[in-house]
Image: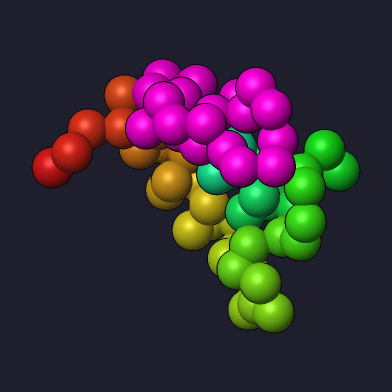
Amino acid sequence: MNATVRGKPGAIRVVPGDPDNSYLIQKLEGAASIVGRQMPINGPYLQPGQILIIRRWIASGAPRN
């Protein structure tokens, strides 16, 4: 969390409480602004409901439990 991303200056992997600015979410959703390819590379890509679970985890502060 709060770790920078190699190859994307200024990007943070997981911003607790802020899924929209967490690079993990951008990579999972295949946002146009990502470096490289959508995760997981070569798929299968996560379903929207699966990404929503990760979004909620980040929104709740990304607790380590």
Quadrant location, the N terminus: top left
Question: Residue at point 70% right, 42% down?
Answer: 7
- Say how the picture is coloured: rainbow
The answer to whether residue 9 is left or right of residue 33 is left
Residue 9 on the magenta span = yes
Residue 52 locus on image (x, y percent): 50, 46
Nearer the observer, 36 or 29: 36
Query: Total label count?
Result: 0
Pinpoint residue 29: horizontal percent, then vertical percent: 69, 51
Residue at 58% across / 38% down in the picture? 5
The residue that appears at 55% across and 44% down in the rendered structure is: 24
Which residue sits at x=69%, y=79%?
A: 42
Q: Can residue 31 be seen in this view?
A: no
Question: Residue 40's quadrant in the figure?
Answer: bottom right
Residue that sits furthest to the left in the current view: 65
Judge whether residue 3 is colored magenta.
yes
Tell me if 5 is positioned left or right of 2 in this view: right
Is residue 24 visible in the rendered image? The answer is yes
Whether residue 33 is situated above or below residue 20 in the rendered picture = below
* Residue 17 image position (x, y, % from top left): 41, 20
* Residue 61: image location, x then y, percent: 31, 24
Up-down: is 61 above or below 30? above
Image quadrant holding the C terminus, namely top left
Viewed as shown, does residue 61 lie left or right of 15? Answer: left
The image quarter containing residue 10 is top right
The magenta segment: 1-21
